[in-house]
Amino acid sequence: MIIKTDMFRLIVTESCNAKCKYCLASLTPKPGQNQSLKAVEQAARKAKENGAKEATISGGEPLLDKDIINKIKIVKKYFKKVNLQTNGTLMINPKGLKRAGITHVIVNLPSYEKKVYELLTGVKKFGKLMSNMKKALKAGLKVRINSVLVKNYTGDYAHCMKMIEFSKQLGVKELTFTQLVPANEFARQHRTDLDVTRELFKKLTQTENKRYHSADVYNFLDMTIALSSCPIKENSQALENGWTKEYVLTEDSKLVADYFHQDKTLMEVLR
Ligand code: SF4
Protein backbone atom coordinates (compact mmCIF):
# COMPACT_ATOMS: atom_id res chain seq x y z
CA MET A 1 0.00 0.00 0.00
CA ILE A 2 1.29 3.50 -0.87
CA ILE A 3 0.76 5.94 1.98
CA LYS A 4 -0.02 9.46 0.83
CA THR A 5 1.23 12.45 2.78
CA ASP A 6 1.07 16.25 3.10
CA MET A 7 4.47 17.03 4.58
CA PHE A 8 8.09 15.88 4.36
CA ARG A 9 9.93 16.06 7.70
CA LEU A 10 13.69 15.82 7.76
CA ILE A 11 15.13 15.03 11.19
CA VAL A 12 18.80 15.84 10.72
CA THR A 13 19.87 15.02 14.27
CA GLU A 14 18.29 13.85 17.51
CA SER A 15 20.91 15.71 19.56
CA CYS A 16 20.13 19.08 21.07
CA ASN A 17 21.99 21.82 22.89
CA ALA A 18 18.98 22.40 25.17
CA LYS A 19 17.74 20.13 27.93
CA CYS A 20 14.00 20.59 28.00
CA LYS A 21 12.45 18.71 30.89
CA TYR A 22 9.71 17.26 28.71
CA CYS A 23 11.81 16.11 25.75
CA LEU A 24 13.42 12.78 24.95
CA ALA A 25 16.21 14.48 22.97
CA SER A 26 17.49 16.05 26.18
CA LEU A 27 17.54 12.71 27.95
CA THR A 28 19.22 10.66 25.25
CA PRO A 29 21.83 12.86 23.60
CA LYS A 30 23.67 10.88 20.98
CA PRO A 31 26.21 11.74 18.31
CA GLY A 32 24.92 12.52 14.82
CA GLN A 33 24.49 9.53 12.53
CA ASN A 34 25.83 11.19 9.37
CA GLN A 35 22.63 11.20 7.39
CA SER A 36 23.76 11.20 3.78
CA LEU A 37 22.88 13.88 1.25
CA LYS A 38 21.85 11.10 -1.13
CA ALA A 39 19.31 9.79 1.41
CA VAL A 40 17.93 13.33 1.84
CA GLU A 41 17.54 13.72 -1.92
CA GLN A 42 15.80 10.34 -2.35
CA ALA A 43 13.46 10.92 0.58
CA ALA A 44 12.50 14.45 -0.54
CA ARG A 45 11.74 13.16 -4.04
CA LYS A 46 9.65 10.26 -2.71
CA ALA A 47 7.66 12.51 -0.38
CA LYS A 48 6.99 14.93 -3.21
CA GLU A 49 5.85 12.10 -5.51
CA ASN A 50 3.42 10.93 -2.82
CA GLY A 51 1.73 14.26 -2.31
CA ALA A 52 3.85 16.32 0.13
CA LYS A 53 3.38 20.03 -0.42
CA GLU A 54 5.90 21.43 2.04
CA ALA A 55 8.93 20.40 4.07
CA THR A 56 10.03 20.86 7.68
CA ILE A 57 13.63 20.44 8.79
CA SER A 58 13.89 19.63 12.48
CA GLY A 59 15.73 17.72 15.20
CA GLY A 60 16.80 17.63 18.07
CA GLU A 61 18.34 20.93 17.14
CA PRO A 62 18.87 21.01 13.35
CA LEU A 63 21.42 23.85 13.47
CA LEU A 64 23.86 21.47 15.19
CA ASP A 65 24.23 19.67 11.84
CA LYS A 66 27.34 20.91 10.05
CA ASP A 67 25.82 19.95 6.69
CA ILE A 68 22.56 21.80 7.28
CA ILE A 69 22.97 24.35 4.48
CA ASN A 70 23.53 21.62 1.86
CA LYS A 71 20.52 19.69 3.14
CA ILE A 72 18.31 22.80 2.97
CA LYS A 73 19.45 23.40 -0.62
CA ILE A 74 18.51 19.83 -1.60
CA VAL A 75 15.09 20.03 0.05
CA LYS A 76 14.47 23.39 -1.62
CA LYS A 77 14.78 21.77 -5.07
CA TYR A 78 11.52 19.91 -4.31
CA PHE A 79 9.56 22.28 -2.06
CA LYS A 80 8.72 25.96 -2.25
CA LYS A 81 7.79 26.21 1.43
CA VAL A 82 10.60 24.97 3.70
CA ASN A 83 10.22 25.35 7.48
CA LEU A 84 13.06 25.17 9.97
CA GLN A 85 11.99 24.01 13.44
CA THR A 86 14.59 25.15 15.95
CA ASN A 87 15.13 26.29 19.52
CA GLY A 88 16.59 29.44 17.96
CA THR A 89 19.65 29.75 20.18
CA LEU A 90 22.09 28.88 17.36
CA MET A 91 20.27 30.83 14.64
CA ILE A 92 23.03 33.42 14.24
CA ASN A 93 22.78 33.81 10.47
CA PRO A 94 19.11 33.87 9.40
CA LYS A 95 20.03 35.62 6.13
CA GLY A 96 22.19 32.63 5.17
CA LEU A 97 19.34 30.23 6.02
CA LYS A 98 17.00 32.26 3.84
CA ARG A 99 19.47 32.28 0.96
CA ALA A 100 19.74 28.48 1.20
CA GLY A 101 15.96 28.13 0.91
CA ILE A 102 14.28 28.43 4.32
CA THR A 103 11.02 30.39 4.13
CA HIS A 104 9.56 29.86 7.64
CA VAL A 105 11.16 29.45 11.06
CA ILE A 106 9.28 27.66 13.85
CA VAL A 107 10.86 28.59 17.16
CA ASN A 108 10.28 26.54 20.29
CA LEU A 109 9.64 29.02 23.08
CA PRO A 110 7.75 27.67 26.10
CA SER A 111 7.57 30.98 27.99
CA TYR A 112 7.93 34.76 27.66
CA GLU A 113 9.39 34.77 31.17
CA LYS A 114 13.17 34.34 31.24
CA LYS A 115 13.09 32.44 34.53
CA VAL A 116 10.45 29.93 33.41
CA TYR A 117 12.14 29.53 30.00
CA GLU A 118 15.47 28.71 31.66
CA LEU A 119 13.90 26.34 34.14
CA LEU A 120 12.07 24.36 31.45
CA THR A 121 14.78 24.33 28.76
CA GLY A 122 17.85 24.05 31.01
CA VAL A 123 19.73 26.75 29.07
CA LYS A 124 20.47 30.36 29.90
CA LYS A 125 19.99 31.67 26.38
CA PHE A 126 16.83 33.73 26.54
CA GLY A 127 18.58 36.97 25.49
CA LYS A 128 20.37 35.25 22.62
CA LEU A 129 17.14 33.67 21.39
CA MET A 130 15.32 37.02 21.45
CA SER A 131 18.04 38.72 19.42
CA ASN A 132 18.14 35.82 16.91
CA MET A 133 14.37 35.96 16.46
CA LYS A 134 14.52 39.70 15.76
CA LYS A 135 17.28 39.07 13.20
CA ALA A 136 15.17 36.39 11.52
CA LEU A 137 12.19 38.74 11.24
CA LYS A 138 14.44 41.48 9.88
CA ALA A 139 15.84 39.05 7.30
CA GLY A 140 12.28 38.59 6.02
CA LEU A 141 11.69 35.08 7.35
CA LYS A 142 8.20 34.23 8.58
CA VAL A 143 8.48 33.30 12.26
CA ARG A 144 6.04 31.10 14.17
CA ILE A 145 6.40 30.50 17.91
CA ASN A 146 5.65 27.03 19.16
CA SER A 147 4.83 27.10 22.86
CA VAL A 148 4.23 23.95 24.89
CA LEU A 149 1.55 23.90 27.56
CA VAL A 150 3.18 22.64 30.76
CA LYS A 151 0.93 22.19 33.79
CA ASN A 152 1.99 24.44 36.73
CA TYR A 153 4.38 26.40 34.48
CA THR A 154 2.81 27.62 31.23
CA GLY A 155 -0.48 25.78 30.84
CA ASP A 156 -2.92 28.35 32.24
CA TYR A 157 -5.04 31.06 30.73
CA ALA A 158 -3.02 34.01 32.08
CA HIS A 159 0.24 32.64 30.69
CA CYS A 160 -1.34 31.94 27.30
CA MET A 161 -2.71 35.48 27.04
CA LYS A 162 0.66 36.96 27.97
CA MET A 163 2.38 34.73 25.38
CA ILE A 164 0.00 36.14 22.75
CA GLU A 165 0.79 39.75 23.76
CA PHE A 166 4.52 39.04 23.92
CA SER A 167 4.59 37.41 20.46
CA LYS A 168 2.58 40.25 18.96
CA GLN A 169 4.97 42.84 20.36
CA LEU A 170 7.90 40.97 18.86
CA GLY A 171 6.23 41.17 15.45
CA VAL A 172 5.42 37.45 15.29
CA LYS A 173 2.09 36.72 13.61
CA GLU A 174 1.70 32.99 14.29
CA LEU A 175 1.64 31.22 17.63
CA THR A 176 0.88 27.58 18.35
CA PHE A 177 0.08 26.22 21.81
CA THR A 178 0.97 22.55 21.87
CA GLN A 179 -0.07 19.83 24.25
CA LEU A 180 2.94 17.91 25.60
CA VAL A 181 3.69 14.56 24.00
CA PRO A 182 3.96 12.04 26.88
CA ALA A 183 7.62 11.35 26.08
CA ASN A 184 8.91 10.97 29.65
CA GLU A 185 7.75 11.03 33.26
CA PHE A 186 7.89 14.84 33.55
CA ALA A 187 5.80 15.24 30.39
CA ARG A 188 3.26 12.67 31.59
CA GLN A 189 2.87 14.46 34.93
CA HIS A 190 2.70 17.96 33.46
CA ARG A 191 0.54 17.28 30.45
CA THR A 192 -2.38 19.67 30.34
CA ASP A 193 -5.78 18.76 29.23
CA LEU A 194 -6.58 21.26 26.48
CA ASP A 195 -9.53 22.16 28.71
CA VAL A 196 -7.04 23.97 30.94
CA THR A 197 -7.16 26.73 28.38
CA ARG A 198 -10.97 26.71 28.46
CA GLU A 199 -11.24 30.47 28.95
CA LEU A 200 -8.86 31.15 26.11
CA PHE A 201 -10.74 28.62 24.02
CA LYS A 202 -14.00 30.43 24.74
CA LYS A 203 -12.53 33.71 23.48
CA LEU A 204 -11.01 32.07 20.43
CA THR A 205 -14.12 30.20 19.38
CA GLN A 206 -15.90 33.51 18.90
CA THR A 207 -13.54 34.07 15.96
CA GLU A 208 -13.05 32.33 12.62
CA ASN A 209 -11.95 28.73 13.12
CA LYS A 210 -10.33 26.11 10.89
CA ARG A 211 -9.27 22.56 11.63
CA TYR A 212 -5.77 21.71 10.33
CA HIS A 213 -4.64 18.14 11.06
CA SER A 214 -4.58 17.84 14.87
CA ALA A 215 -4.86 21.61 15.48
CA ASP A 216 -7.68 24.13 15.77
CA VAL A 217 -6.62 27.37 14.12
CA TYR A 218 -8.09 30.81 14.94
CA ASN A 219 -7.70 34.42 13.83
CA PHE A 220 -7.37 36.38 17.05
CA LEU A 221 -6.07 39.93 17.67
CA ASP A 222 -4.64 39.99 14.13
CA MET A 223 -2.66 36.84 14.80
CA THR A 224 -3.02 33.20 13.81
CA ILE A 225 -3.34 31.15 16.98
CA ALA A 226 -3.40 27.36 16.90
CA LEU A 227 -4.23 24.89 19.65
CA SER A 228 -2.57 21.61 18.84
CA SER A 229 -3.22 18.31 20.55
CA CYS A 230 -0.95 15.29 20.76
CA PRO A 231 -1.75 13.49 17.50
CA ILE A 232 -0.65 9.89 18.20
CA LYS A 233 -4.16 8.39 18.21
CA GLU A 234 -5.42 10.35 15.22
CA ASN A 235 -2.31 9.44 13.26
CA SER A 236 -2.88 5.74 13.90
CA GLN A 237 -6.37 5.99 12.46
CA ALA A 238 -5.18 7.96 9.44
CA LEU A 239 -2.51 5.38 8.70
CA GLU A 240 -5.12 2.65 8.56
CA ASN A 241 -6.66 4.61 5.71
CA GLY A 242 -3.41 5.00 3.75
CA TRP A 243 -2.61 8.56 4.73
CA THR A 244 -0.11 10.20 7.06
CA LYS A 245 0.47 13.82 7.99
CA GLU A 246 4.16 13.48 7.21
CA TYR A 247 6.88 11.29 5.80
CA VAL A 248 9.91 11.41 8.06
CA LEU A 249 13.55 10.83 7.19
CA THR A 250 15.13 9.90 10.52
CA GLU A 251 18.63 10.77 11.68
CA ASP A 252 19.87 7.33 10.60
CA SER A 253 18.40 7.70 7.10
CA LYS A 254 15.24 5.60 7.51
CA LEU A 255 12.24 6.89 5.61
CA VAL A 256 9.11 6.25 7.66
CA ALA A 257 5.52 7.40 7.75
CA ASP A 258 5.03 9.38 10.95
CA TYR A 259 7.62 9.61 13.71
CA PHE A 260 5.46 7.79 16.26
CA HIS A 261 4.77 4.75 14.09
CA GLN A 262 8.20 3.98 12.70
CA ASP A 263 8.15 0.19 12.96
CA LYS A 264 4.58 -0.22 11.85
CA THR A 265 4.87 1.65 8.59
CA LEU A 266 8.46 1.48 7.43
CA MET A 267 7.89 -1.25 4.89
CA GLU A 268 4.79 0.31 3.40
CA VAL A 269 6.47 3.64 2.78
CA LEU A 270 9.59 2.19 1.23
CA ARG A 271 7.68 -0.04 -1.13
S1 SF4 B 1 14.75 22.44 22.15
FE1 SF4 B 1 13.37 20.93 21.27
S2 SF4 B 1 14.66 19.16 20.76
FE2 SF4 B 1 15.83 20.47 22.15
S3 SF4 B 1 15.49 19.59 24.17
FE3 SF4 B 1 13.98 21.24 23.86
S4 SF4 B 1 12.15 20.26 23.00
FE4 SF4 B 1 13.88 18.82 22.81
Image (cartoon, grey):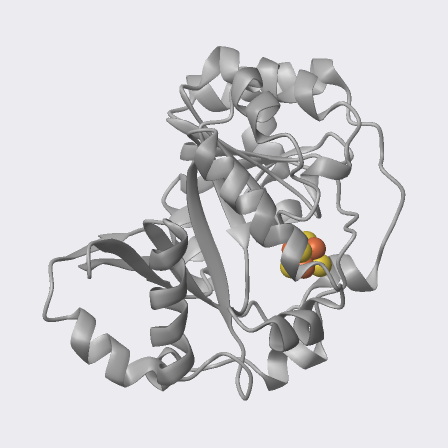
Report the side of 256 relative to 194 (left or right): right
Please say whether residue 164 is visible from this viewpoint.
yes
Task: In the rendered view, tell whether residue 95 sits above or below residue 73.
Answer: below
Ligand 1 shows up in the quarter that is: bottom right
Residue 114 drawn above or below residue 125: below
Position in image of residue 42 (x %, y %): 62, 15
Residue 107 or 202: which is nearer the viewer? 107
Q: Is residue 2 visible?
A: no
- 119 in relation to 245, above or below: below
Marker count (numbered): 0
Q: Is residue 90 left or right of residue 165?
A: right
Task: Name the residue rendered at 63%, 37% in the picture.
Answer: 266
Could you say which is closer to the camera, residue 52 or residue 190? 190
Q: x%, y% of residue 37?
A: 72, 16
Residue positioned most to the right? 31
Quadrant in which the C terminus is drawn: top right
**Residue 18, image x, y percentages:** 75, 58
Which quadrant of the structure image shows residue 204? Answer: bottom left
Give how far across and how far down residue 184 sits, in percent: 70, 73
Q: Residue shown at 47%/14% (left/top)?
A: 78
Q: Is residue 167 above or below residue 72?
A: below
* Residue in the image at 79% along x and 52% along y: 17
Please identify the residue farthest to the bottom as the structure is shown: 152
Specify whether 150 is left or right of 137. right
Q: Nearer the viewer, residue 111 or 212?
A: 111
The quadrant where residue 189 appears: bottom right
